[in-house]
Amino acid sequence: MTLTHLGTGSRGNATLLETEHAKVLIDQGFSGAQLEKRLGRLNIHPTDIDYIFISHHHGDHGGGAAVVQKRWKMKVQANHRTAEELGLLPELTHNFESLDMIHVSQDLAILPVPVPHSGADNVAFIASHNGGRAAVITDLGSWTDELVTHVRGCEHIAIEANYDHDRLMNGPYPYSLKDRISGRGGHLSNEQTGRFLAQVCTPATKSISLTHLSEKNNQPHLAESTVLYHIDGIFSGDITISLQDGPEDSHYIGRTVHANDAEFVHSKKQ
Ligand SMILES: [Zn+2]
Ligand SMILES: [Zn+2]
């Protein structure tokens, strides 16, 4: 399985998961044209996607879902609240329940796990492929024991590192917004992400990508150094930062990549 971020941040999120038998997107916060362009760099057309899984209804995650249902008849998986808020087409939408495993193909299953995020029924997704698991977690102000249980030991963890606490507090946002972002239903700071990762990383964890960095209240080097401080001695794999403009390098989960897997290895076109 490969996981490739097409872009993450407050201006749009989408992540591609690809196995031999399935292609799914997690979130579609881009315009139809942007999605087509970003997938095109990987030689994929929107109609090649089996399902789009939407985490929650905020525009940067689900704002582009209804438009691609209309334009390309793309099939969407979302919980009831998210589907309703986004006005998804019922004939192209499957409503999942949290903690119900969705079998997309013989080699890909996806588990939605609820996470706290104000005013939304947000979920993290755990994708399973040939015994390997990858977690995609974003937009949460805090976490639950249930989330820790499901993410522990995942081979790859993509998680938001939204803001640096000092930058947020000393930055330009009004107090009410600073309060909302840093609250229990807001976003994770670099430090919180580090503390969460310290609870879930095991020797099985091979790679981490930090996503959804605030362009005003964070910097890649701050996110990476703060997170590494918390997982020093626990984690020795690769850590990457996913920014707003992708697609970026793919992560491999569930097996070693051999030469004959070349068809799954994307080369970035300029
Ligand atoms: Zn977001
Ligand atoms: Zn959100």
Image (spheres, rainbow, N blue to C red):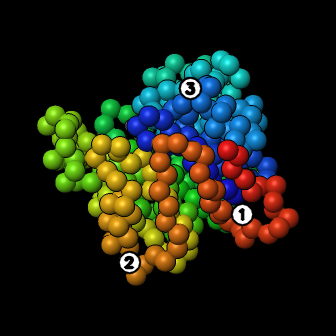
Nearest to the eye among marks 2 and 1: give it: 2
Amino acid type of disc 2?
Asp
Q: Is residue 218 left or right of residue 152?
A: left
Q: x%, y% of residue 239?
A: 49, 66
Q: Farthest residue toward the front?
A: 270
Residue 218: x percent and y percent? Answer: 31, 51
* Amino acid found under the numbered disc labelled 1: Asn
Q: With respect to residue 253, does 83 lie above or below?
A: above
Q: At numbered mark 2, what does the secondary structure look like: helix, strand or loop?
A: loop
Q: Is residue 19 left or right of residue 186?
A: right
**157 vs 112: above or below:** below
Give me the residue at 67% from left, 31% from top. 36
Taking depth in this image into account, of 9 and 92 the one nearest to the observer is: 9
Label 3: few (<14), some or many (≥20) within 10 Å? some
**With respect to residue 76, does 124 lie above or below?**
below
- Amino acid at dot 3: Ser
- Residue displayed at 71% across by 63% down: 130
User: In the rendered image, which quarter contains the N terminus?
Assistant: bottom right
Identify residue for label 1: 130
The quarter of the picture where the C terminus appears is: top right
Q: Is residue 200 left or right of residue 126?
A: left
Q: Are marks 1 and 3 in contact (CB under 8 Å)?
A: no
Query: Would you name the residue on which mark 3 appears?
Result: 31
Q: Which mark is residue 232?
A: 2
- Label 3, secondary structure: give it: loop
Q: Is residue 49 visible?
A: no
Q: Residue at x 81, y 62 (%)?
A: 261
Sooner in the amino-acid sequence: mark 1 or mark 3: 3
Q: Which mark is residue 115?
A: none
Q: Quadrant of ligand 2?
A: top left
